[in-house]
Amino acid sequence: MLIIKILPGENIERALKKYRNKVRKTQQLKRIKENREFIKKSREKREGLEKAIYRNEYFRKNEE
């Protein structure tokens, strides 16, 4: 749960900006999206490997 302290007389827009920044910094939205479905460790590892291979090939092509 995120707690944002609002000073008396503070603008609501300023409070919303503080809230958005705190959500972004704590990566709360990312964790919520990850928890939608269970992903097996083997599948996670495989997807990470595929991503690494893709990135490696992409950067290698752009180097030349």
Image (cartoon, rainbow, N blue to C red):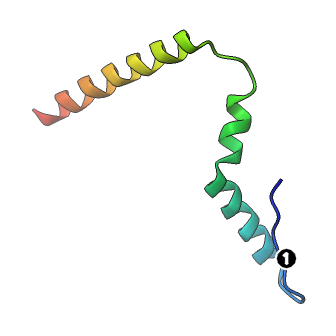
Q: Residue furthest front?
A: 41
Q: Residue at x 32, y 28 (%)?
A: 55
Q: Residue furthest right?
A: 8
Quarter residue 49 falls in: top left
Going by the image, does 37 lie left or right of 59?
right
Identify the residue under disc 1: 12
Q: Residue at x 67, y 30 (%)?
A: 34
Q: Residue at x 18, y 28 (%)?
A: 61
Amino acid type at image mark 1: Ile
Q: Is residue 22 above or below residue 31?
A: below
Q: How many marks?
A: 1
Quarter residue 20 falls in: bottom right
Going by the image, does 16 lie left or right of 46?
right
Q: Is residue 27 above or below residue 54?
A: below
Q: Is residue 16 above or below residue 46?
A: below
The image position of residue 10, as x and y in percent, is 84, 85
Q: Give the structural element (helix, strand or loop) at label 1.
A: helix
